[in-house]
Structures are given as structure tokens and as C-alpha cells.
Amino acid sequence: MSNQRNLTELHPELLAYAQSLTLDKAAAEDLVHDALVRALQSKAVPRKADEVRPWAFRVLKNLFLDVRRRQKVRAGYAREEALLNHASAHRSLDPVEALIVRQAYDSLSAHDREVICLIDILGLTYAEASAVMDVPIGTVMSRISRARRAMLDIIEGSNVRPLRKHKQAK
């Protein structure tokens, strides 16, 4: 029997397991679908028929944990962004400087804005940003370097000194 058939025959059991993890029928169905797609695309499918079943459950569980981690990081990101927006509304910055920094930030590419926000504004580690962006940590390191350089080039071109990270409201 083919691995594809073995996997598709496991659908009802995988769905029951996914529902026990998610407590949500729609989320469980999505999870099973994604797990089956991942399993069918995998090059590491066990060769023995009796090993396919536990392996498929592991694929589903790992996918569930990945989704939960991403949701947790995104929820933290949303909380931090809300706190940042609230705090920035109460800071007494030079309005011209704040405008130039904001315009420089807004003029960056989406990748540059994302990495600057995650690391420099929200304070995530490179590893955390890597998980959020779903890219290798080395990619995060090169993106933050390029993004900071681009931001600094834009700010220096405006003839206004850049905002310092350690500067606090008085």
C-alpha cells in the first residue's frame, strides 16, 4: 500500500487528534490538511507501513506546536506594538526629529520595516525575529544590518540628527 493511501486513511484519526489539541473543529480541519500536505511532500516518510501512523501524528503535533509558537509571538508583538504606540504618544520628542524618523521608517521596504520593528522597536532577539519572520537567523542578521544602514542614510540625508535608542522622555 502506498504512503499516500496510508496517510489519507489516517484522516479521521488525525482529525480526532487535532480536535483534541485545538478544541476547534475548523482549526482542526485546517491543521490536518496542512499536516497531510506537509507529510505528503516530505522526503522522510517512513518506508514501513507500521511506522507511518505514529510519524503522521508527530507531523501533526509538530505543526500544531509551530502554529501555537507563531501565534504566541504574534500576540506578544501586538501587545508590544500597542504599548509602543501608547508610550510614543506620551513622549516629548522634538517634533521635527520624530517626523523625520517616522518618514524614514515609512520609506523603508516592507522587509526593512518588519525587521526594524521586531528588533529595534519591540526588542525581540534575532532568534525570536527569525521565528516570527520564518527565515534563518543569518537572514535576520543581514536584514537588520541593511535596514539600519538604509534608515540611517535616509535620516542623515535630512540633516537632522538621528533619534538615539537610549534617549528618554523628561
Image (cartoon, rainbow, N blue to C red):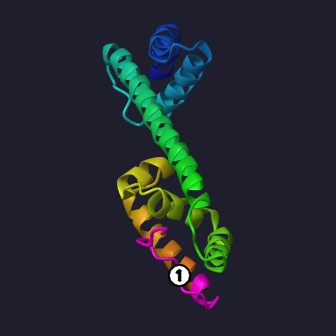
Q: Position of residue 150 (x, y in %)?
A: 56, 79
Question: Considering only vertical position in the picture, is 106 above or below 83?
Answer: below
Residue 147, compared with residue 57, is above or below; it is: below
Magenta-highlighted residues: 154-170
Q: How many marks?
A: 1
Q: Position of residue 40 (x, y in %)?
A: 49, 29
Residue 112 percent coordinates (x, y): 56, 67
Q: Where is residue 118? Give x, y as percent.
A: 49, 57
- Could you tell me which quadrant the N terminus lies in? top left
**Residue toward you, 83 or 102:** 83
Q: Is residue 39 left or right of residue 58?
A: right
- Identify which residue is drawn at 52% across, 77% down: 163
Decide which of 163, 37 is in the foreground and name it.
163
**What amino acid does circle 1 point to?**
Pro
Residue 159 within the segment the image draws in magenta: yes
Of 150 and 87, the residue lying toward us: 87
Q: Residue sitting at 38 percent across and 58 percent down?
A: 126
Residue 12 against residue 137 in the figure, above or below: above
Q: Nearer the viewer, residue 164 or 69?
A: 164
Q: Main secondary structure of the magenta part?
A: loop
Identify the secondary structure beneath mark 1: loop
* Up-down relation of residue 66 to residue 114 (above or below): above
Where on the picture, by quarter, is residue 145? bottom left
**Residue 123, picture quadrant:** bottom left
Q: List the residue tagged with mark 1.
A: 162
Is residue 106 inside the magenta stretch?
Answer: no
Residue at 59% over, 54% down: 85
Q: Is residue 151 left or right of residue 17?
A: right
Residue farthest front in this picture: 170
